Amino acid sequence: MKKWTNKKRHLREFQIRDLALVNMYAYTRLDGQHRGLVQHDEGHFPILKKVVTQAYKVELPSKIKYHLVFHLSLLKPYPIEKKWIQVGASLIRHMWA
């Protein structure tokens, strides 16, 4: 059973000052909006430090009034750069970088 479970598991690790997207859907208030219209991932926040093996402290802006430590499942790496490649005479964006 473990081998089937681990097929879809993605182990992530962040380094200090890496940028991450934070899933704040559980902490947002809907205020009459449909839940499909609410943005799930917020900003690109730098990682401050690793608290334990699966929790990281994130630097949030002062307007977000919430604790700074998030579980690894609520963090996604922020895609920093999009590379451009040349195909024929034109440049296209390489989306898998």
Image (cartoon, rainbow, N blue to C red):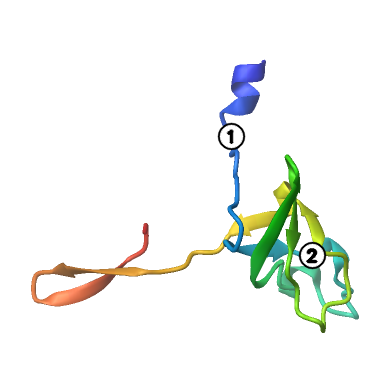
Identify the element where label 2 is drawn: helix
Q: Amino acid at mark 1?
A: Lys
> What's the mark number on residue 95?
none
Q: Locate residue 27 relative to residue 72 in the image: left or right.
A: right
Q: Amino acid at mark 2?
A: Tyr
Q: Locate residue 82 relative to residue 44 in the image: left or right.
A: left
Return the residue found at the far bottom. Answer: 63
Identify the element where label 1 is drawn: loop
Task: Depth check: give the residue in front, 9 or 31.
Answer: 9
Nearest to N terminus: mark 1 or mark 2 = 1
Instruction: Report x, y in % for residue 78.
Output: 55, 64
Task: Depth check: give the residue in front, 46 or 30.
Answer: 46
Task: Depth check: give the residue in front, 40 or 66.
Answer: 66
Return the residue found at the far top. Answer: 1
How far separated are the C-alphas under marks 1 and 2?
22 Å
Residue 44, located in which quarter of the rendered image?
bottom right
The residue carrying mark 1 is 8
- The residue depicted at 36 percent of the width and 63 percent of the height is 95
Task: Depth check: give the residue in front, 14 or 79.
Answer: 14
The residue carrying mark 2 is 25
Instruction: Report x, y in % for residue 71.
Output: 77, 50
